[in-house]
Amino acid sequence: MSRLELRHVRKAFGGLEVLADISLRVGAGEFVSILGPSGAGKSTLFQLLTGAQHGGGEMFFDGAPLDDHGGHFAFMPQRDALMPWRRILDNVTLGLEVQGVRRKAARARVAPLFAEFGLAGFERHFPAQLSGGMRQRAALLRTVVQERDMLLLDEPFGALDALTRTAMQRWLEQMWRHHRWTALLITHDVREAVFLSDRIYVLSARPAHIVREIKVPLPRPRSLGGDTARQASVEAEILDIILNPEPNPQPPKGYDHD
Amino acid sequence: MVSSSSNYPRQLAGLFAKAAPAVISVGLLLLAWELCARYSGIKPTILPAPSRVFAQAMLNREALVDNAIPTIRATLFGFACSLSAAFALSMLVDFFQPLRRALFPVFVISQTLPLVAIAPLVVLWFGFGLMPKVLLVALVTFFPMLVALVQGYEATEAEIGQVLRAMGAGRWRAFVLARLPSALPYFFAGLRISITYAVVGAIFAEYAGAAKGLGIYMLNAKNNFRPDLVLAAVGVSAAVTLVLFGLTVLLQHLAMPWERADRQAQGKGAGR
Ligand SMILES: Nc1ncnc2c1ncn2[C@@H]1O[C@H](COP(=O)(O)OP(=O)(O)OP(=O)(O)O)[C@@H](O)[C@H]1O
Ligand SMILES: [Mg+2]
């Protein structure tokens, strides 16, 4: 059963057509990625989902039209959007606070996660006192502690160095296996998409439509040193699609069916 | 938290270092004035030397203090009124955007009214008491504060709003959690400008008619051909303004502890 379903979603800003025709679905407990070039309209799609913008087409959540934009998603924006005036601890508990969780309970809930996110000892710091990567981890922590129906992650690891990024991707994959979050991830990074996702939608350049839907045939748990050959071939396939957009697109085919 | 207490002496030293150029330039100006008044042959009833102004101020200190108090009172009352009004209206405007287009032209016009013309009228309508001073102070400070607040709300990072909305926060929640704190730097910038206008406004109102106050004191001194006392009163009003200005800086320091962290992050490695 699909939790989130988009049918022919469109969006234009004035005369600028950004999203031409986006149809996709995310099943319960499924990890889906959207892979596309910069400026394609990926963040715009999340703006539509969170209700910051309105566009054409239809959006459904659990089969019902999506109209409560503040009820289902834990959203992590591309820029971390930490509040400069709140200490990291208070930034991380923001979602719980809005949900009405008592401050003490909220703090108790997030406290054990600081070490895991490499933020231990920085609870009382202001965001300006953290590095870019630390800020991004704090933003991710703020997102996952909300325990919503679905995660919307807009390039969550974009500002991290390669080592930390790999560690965080591992952490996320592990957590995902544990919690079976339903998740939609936006990324530029083909490896990241392949490593984390069950399925990948490849987006064209603006005006964006879906070029291909790819099922990732790799078993879980995934490990970065695991079935390297197979992983590499999936990555190569996707890169090929992105770099050589077919002039007359064939109907999308599942990668693992042939 | 930010290890501020440990380097307090250094902060103080830094403050002196920052103040030094201003002290030197003001000192040089006073020196030039002193020399000019002494050796140019201009009569002290036209241009009194700063030393004479200071001596006369000391001699008349009781009268000066006596007259400064109503001015300070009018300034603070008026400023409190305009602050509350600006705050209430800024919120209204933020929640009902059309109000902005309806109200702002009126406020802009209120700012173009020449004080010289308006002050006597307000005194005529409301008498010699506190009321007309409070009104005038409020009139000159209200608009800058309103603009600062409204602009500050608008400076809220769009992504923060989007995150809050996705969390299920309503407009009021988003206002309190994001828009209000985002406006604080603008608020304090507006506060620093307005507080200087406020003192000038109060003095103007007194000039137009008052029982007591620095404004009426200046007027009387001028009529008695005592430019030294006029200047002494000017010095007192400048001192009052400086103190109020300093208070706003202190207040900002206390209200925005993260600002120091921001500044340090921006100035990392640069200067010191
Ligand atoms: N509020 C807006 N008003 C006008 N144009 C907008 C707005 N938001 C986005 N756009 C335009 O929509 C296009 C897509 O922007 P979007 O942020 O969705 O790209 P993206 O795919 O997320 O890119 P990136 O990978 O670089 O983050 C851009 O050309 C941008 O200028
Ligand atoms: Mg984006």
Image (cartoon, rainbow, N blue to C red):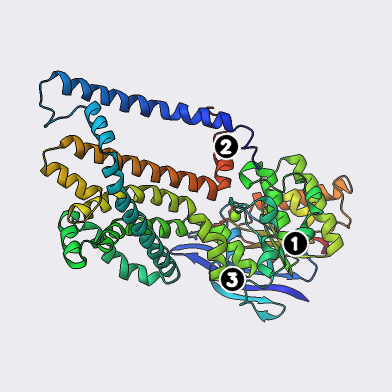
Which of the marked residues, 3 or 1, is nearer the chain's N terminus? Answer: 3
Instruction: Report ligand 2 position as a quadrant.
Output: bottom right
Q: Which quadrant does the N terminus of chain B fall into?
A: top right
Q: Gap between marks 3 and 2, in whole Å?
A: 44 Å
Vertical position of residue B150 compared to residue B65: above or below: below
Judged from this view, the residue extending furthest toward the top is: B39
Q: Establish whether ligand 1 lies closer than 8 Å to the Cβ of label 2.
A: no
Q: Is residue A173 above or below residue B270?
A: below
- Can you see residue A239? no
Residue behind mark 3: A9
Task: State the residue position of label 1.
Answer: A104
Classify mark 2: helix, strand or loop. helix
Q: Nearer the viewer, mark 3 or mark 1?
A: 1
Q: Residue at x 15, y 57 (%)?
A: B117
**Circle 1 SS class:** helix
Q: Residue B57: image x %, image y %?
A: 26, 35
Residue at mark 1 to residue at mark 2: CA–CA distance:
30 Å
Q: Quadrant of residue A61?
A: bottom right
Query: Mark 1: which amino acid?
Result: Lys
Badge 2 is on which residue?
Answer: B264
Residue A249 horizontal/vertical position (percent)? 64, 62
Query: Gap between marks 3 and 1, in whole Å?
Result: 41 Å
| Label 3 element class | strand
Q: Quadrant of the C terminus of chain B?
A: top right
Pointer 1 indicates a residue of which chain?
Answer: A
Outermost residue toward the bottom? A64
Residue A96 in picture, x, y percent from top left: 70, 65
Which corner quadrant of the image does residue B42 belong to? Answer: top left
**Above or below for A97 versus A116:** below
Residue sitting nearer the eye, A50 or B7? B7
Q: Nearer the viewer, mark 1 or mark 2?
A: 1
Structural crowding at the residue carrying mark 3, measured as other residues with C-alpha within 10 Å and reported as few (<14), some (14–19) or many (≥20): some
